Image: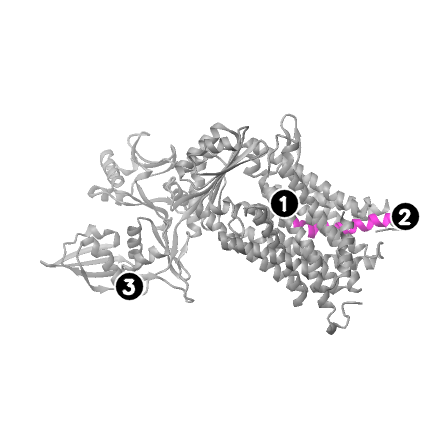
Amino acid sequence: MSDKKSLLKNPRVIIFLLLLFGSIVAIHPSYTPGEGITTNLNFGLDLEGGSWLQIKLEGALAQIDVDSGKLVSGIVEPIIGAPIEITKNSLDVGGSADKSVTFTTSAQVSASQLEALGTVSVDKLSGSKTQVTISDTSKEILVRTYLSKALDAEVVPMSTQKGIVYEIRTGVTEEQLQALLEKVGGSIHKNEDGTSTYKEGVSSETRDLTRDILNDKLNSMGLKEIPVRTVGDEYILIDFAGIDLATAKEIAEKPGKFEIRIQTTGNATEHVLYGDSIQSVGIPTYHDEQWHTPFTLKEEGARALQKIALETGAIDDPNSHYLMMYLDGVEIYGAPLSYSAASKLREGPIYSWEASTGTDEAAKTEATALQVHLRAGALPVNVQLVGSGHVDPNLGSQFKTAAVITGLISLIAVAAVVYFKYRRPEILIPMVGTSFSEVIMILGVAALIGWQLDLPAIAGIIASIGTGIDHLVIITDEVLYEGKLPPTKVFKSRIGKAFAIILGAASTNIIALSPLVVMGFGSLKGFAITTIIGVFIGVIFARPVYGVVIKEFLHVDENGNGSITE
Amino acid sequence: MATGLTELLDNFVKTHDNRQLLALPLAVLAVSLVILLVSFVSSGSPVILGMEFQGGTQISVETTDSPAVLEKMYSSYPIIDARQTGSRVIMQFGVMDEEQQHQLETDVMDRYSSVQIQQVGPVYGQDLQVQAIKALIISFIGMAIVVFLIFRTFIPSAAVILSAFSDIMIAAAFMRVAGIELSLGTLAALLMLIGYSVDSDILLTNRVIKRRGTVEEKVSRAMHTGITMTTTTLAALAVMYLVSTFSYLVIPSFTQITLLSQISIVLIAGLFADMMNTWLLNTGILRWYVMKPEFRGRYNR
């Protein structure tokens, strides 16, 4: 009896027991009549039933070298249909001040043809010579305009430490991009070591924006808690628990309904435009002491807005004719027209708008949310469905039962081998007990961090039963090197030697599986993390305690029997 | 069983010289490499690539219809194969366009119960192939670095790494011969093998070069511990294989869990290879190394 008391005073044993107890609390197994056994454990779709979609984001990132003069010619000449001669060019001058370029041509030019490039002024110098100046422009604007027109996709220049990186939000190969740039005397920038800066994929910000839009869309449909995860920079994984594959695809493909309405009289509102009239949505910016979300309207949207503003009288009295934005029937934003916008609308439609939200942090959050809402299902990049899956709920529960049975029988089989080898219950009981506790602790960690247990994770747990026992065998054989329990001093050095081997073996296990955690295999992450957690718990908490316990158990036996055979 | 095997192996090691010990594992390694090479030359890949790596759709349903009936029923789709496991039929389809895919899924879901669908686009499959190769290489190099850090001597470390390399190659060749496809599950098994197969090699090398005693005795003792270790792991895996593969024969309502079945069978093959490689290949090299005259019995006292 005294031995058991001394065991309970050992700090390692105390920590171990606390962790074990904590794990059981975290798992929280309980039995409800009618519902069966319930726990806090989360199960993956393959055990719970449901479907999943895997989406690839198509896009490319590249730094671009281009001669600004040739670029201007390359962009302008096809539009106006005549050669141009550049007379003044400040595009290559450093600094961020507004830059301009001036050229002359023999063709007729109207300012609206070149509007997208900057502020355009046209002077007719003589009957056959027109001078055009584009100011408020830059090389980035020109490259963006050229590429987005040629590829019919959004192109976003981003400043990075290495320089300007262009994000092309559609699938384009390196060869295609290079060919496009060669037409305007440009090329894809090469790194110092000669490798290309072209990279397939999108920036992590764009990936996260896409994820947020999907999340927003799914949640706005009343489907709460549909996890949308990003895997690597290129893939997004959506889990639909309890929803079949056909429905899942329908949900993901159906865009949200975004609408702008205008207040007419009192609380009555009138339709202005739908989300399909929105051309693009920009990143929230802070200026004039306000947060703004910029967006641009397509031709018909801008005209519709102008028409209704005139009809309702909003241009004369903006404050009683609020513009309201709705997503799937829910109001998400409302504000009056600014006086400057109202007076501009008198003259013509406005394409570029900004929704201001206020000055504080909350306004910033609102502006960001608005950016997501405005897109309403229109994702910033082209996507491609690259994988999907479906498991019927009853099949999932079969898998779950089979997996639990497999785990239990595995433990029994391992125990049988151990007993066959040592033929001593005082070794068998601590060994199986330690192994079983390790499984409980892995499950405890899973419950605590909300980790989803899927089939690969179950395989990981069974595998860690196997290796866990391996390490306990190493400790046992090391301790009983001469066939009997050595004096305490020798015992301690033996345990040290055993741990030298165990730590070596454990580190190779962890290293070998770690690529699966960071690499894009969404489905094997569970397996790798579970196994690695298992190895950690085993080496740090469980196995040292086994060393202590086995000593006490064998010590008792030693006193009782006086002899030990291997 | 474990004890019998240990005695047999122990005697074999004691009565044969190092050259003889190396003969069998090196021959098996050579045969495995030839198998993988022939497969690579003839089909472009050393192992059979599963659906996940090639793209396509796998649908498994609960049915009393025979595979032949199903194959005929879905012949308008690019069906490649239909096979029966217990009360289920698993159908394999090639790559389809989105509309056809949708049609097939709706049809299957209306007609059958307990449906499981898995679809992988060819683009993702290509991506996975690249990632799989990267994962294997990084994992192996990581393991090799850890082994070198542990022992800090070239030949003993190299022997451990060679033995692990041989385990992977033999397991991969086994997959090719037994017709087991490379799936995410079997890839995980190969990676796990890289980590687990060196456990017994580390035990052996640690005991032989860091302990006192005669080499013969140290090898023999390490073997007793090592074989017990491998046998317990094999027992857990054998159960996993049997339950996930054949439980439906006992309990008809159960289904095969392909993932667990594949992981376990590849690990079992790898661990058998590991027993041979640890106790013949690694032992042979290590015994030759520590008995070298320049050490003057440093490791043998």
Disc 2 or disc 1, which is closer to the eye? 1
Using residue A141 as the reference point, say whether residue A504 is left or right of it: right
Q: CA distance from mark 3 to mark 2?
A: 92 Å
Image disc number at residue B264:
1
Q: How many marks?
A: 3
- The residue under the point 42% across, 47% down is A57
Contact check, label 3 and label 2, Cβ < 8 Å: no
Mark nearer the N terminus (3 vs 2): 3
Mark 2: few/some/many CA within 10 Å (<14, 14-19, 20+): few
Q: Is residue B157 magenta?
A: no
**Quarter the N terminus of chain A occupies:** top right
Q: Which residue is mark 2?
A: A561
What type of secondary structure mainly makes up the magenta span? Answer: helix
Local SS, label 1: helix
Say what secondary structure mark 3 lies in. Answer: loop
* Of B109 and B178, the residue lying toward us: B178
What amino acid type is highlighted by mark number 3?
A: Asp
Q: Is residue B35 left or right of residue A324?
A: right
The kind of secondary structure element at disc 2 is helix
